[in-house]
Amino acid sequence: MDGGRLPGALRKGDVLVVVDVQVDFVSGSLAIPGASAVIAPLNAWIEAFTRRGLPIVATRDWHPAGHLSFRKHGGPWPEHCVAGTPGAAFAPGLRLPAESWIISKATQPDRDAYSGFEGTTLGDWLRHQHATRLFVGGLATDYCVLHTVLDACERGFGTFVLADAVAAVNARSGDGDRARATMEQAGAAFVKLADIPAEAVPRG
Ligand code: VGL
Ligand code: ZN
C-alpha cells in the first residue's frame, strides 16, 4: 500500500510490460490524448531492460471485425485494433526488440478484455520467466493499464507503473487520476526511469 515505494536497481525477475501502444490508440480511430508522448519514455525503458538482459512483453488489443465493444455492435468504442489491420500494428517509433514476447488480447468476438492477463497466456509466460516485479506502461491508464496493473497486484507481483509513459482516455474528466489512485490503493507504485539507479558499468 506504499504508493511512494521506489524499486531500487533493476534486477533479475523484473519484466517490462508495454500495454497496447498501437496505431489506433496513438493516432487512429481511438486516439488517446497525449498518447504519442509515451513513446520516447517507453523506448528509454525498453533500452534499460534490454541493456540488462531483462525480458519485455508487449500486449496488443486484437479484436475480430465486428467485436462487441464497437459502437456498431452496441459497445462503447469506435471500431479499433481489428486484428491484422494497420490500426492494430504497434505504433511506429516504438522500438520493441524482435525478441519481445507479444500477447494478443480481446480476440473473441463476444467478450472484451482490458487486462493483459484475461484470456491470455501472460500469467503462464511470466511464471516461466520467474517474474517477480512488473513495470507497466502504455495505453490507456484508465482501461488496459488499470486492469493489467490490478491483476498484477492481485497475483502478487511487485507492480510499478511508468509514471511518464502512460496516457488516459479520460472519457469522463478525472478518469485517469481516479485510475492512478485505484492502482496505488491496490499496491502499485508510480516510478520514473530517473528513479532507477544507473547500472553499474564494468570498468575496462
Ligand atoms: C483499450 C479501449 C478499448 C485500452 C482497449 O487498450 O486501454 N481501451 N480497447
Ligand atoms: Zn479494444
Image (cartoon, rainbow, N blue to C red):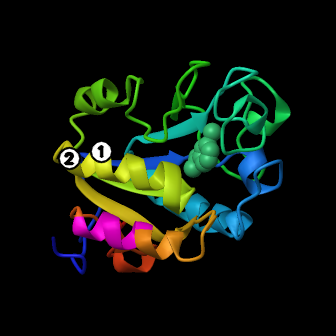
Residue at (66% x, 66% y) in the render: 40
For the question of whether residue 80 can be seen, the reply is no
Total labels: the figure holds: 2
Residue 14: x and y, percent?
Answer: 29, 50
Residue 38: x and y, percent?
Answer: 63, 65
* Residue 184 sits inside the magenta stretch: yes
> What is the three-letter code of the residue carrying label 2?
Glu
Circle 2 packing at 10 Å, graded few (<14), some (14-19), many (20+), is few
Circle 1 packing at 10 Å, graded few (<14), some (14-19), many (20+), is some
The front one of 92 and 168 is 168
Q: Which residues are magenta?
A: 179-185
> What is the three-letter code of the residue carrying label 1?
Asp
Q: Is residue 35 above or below residue 72?
A: below
Residue 197: x and y, percent?
Answer: 32, 76
**Disc 1, SS:** helix
For the question of whether residue 192 can be seen, the reply is yes
**Which residue is under mark 1?**
151
The front one of 168 and 99 is 168
Q: Establish whether ligand 1 lies closer than 8 Å to the Cβ of label 2.
A: no
Residue at (70% x, 70% y) in the render: 34
Query: Farthest residue in the front direction?
Result: 74
Does residue 140 appear to the left or right of 196 in the view shown?
Answer: right
Residue at (53% x, 25% y) in the render: 111
The quadrant of the picture showing ligand 2 is top right
Asked if marks 2 and 1 touch (Cβ < 8 Å), the reply is yes
* Quarter of the figure that contains the C terminus: bottom left
Q: Is residue 8 above or below residue 55?
A: below
The front one of 14 and 164 is 164
| Separation of residues labelled 2 and 1 (CA atoms) | 5 Å
**Which residue is under mark 2?**
154
Residue at (44% x, 66% y) in the render: 162
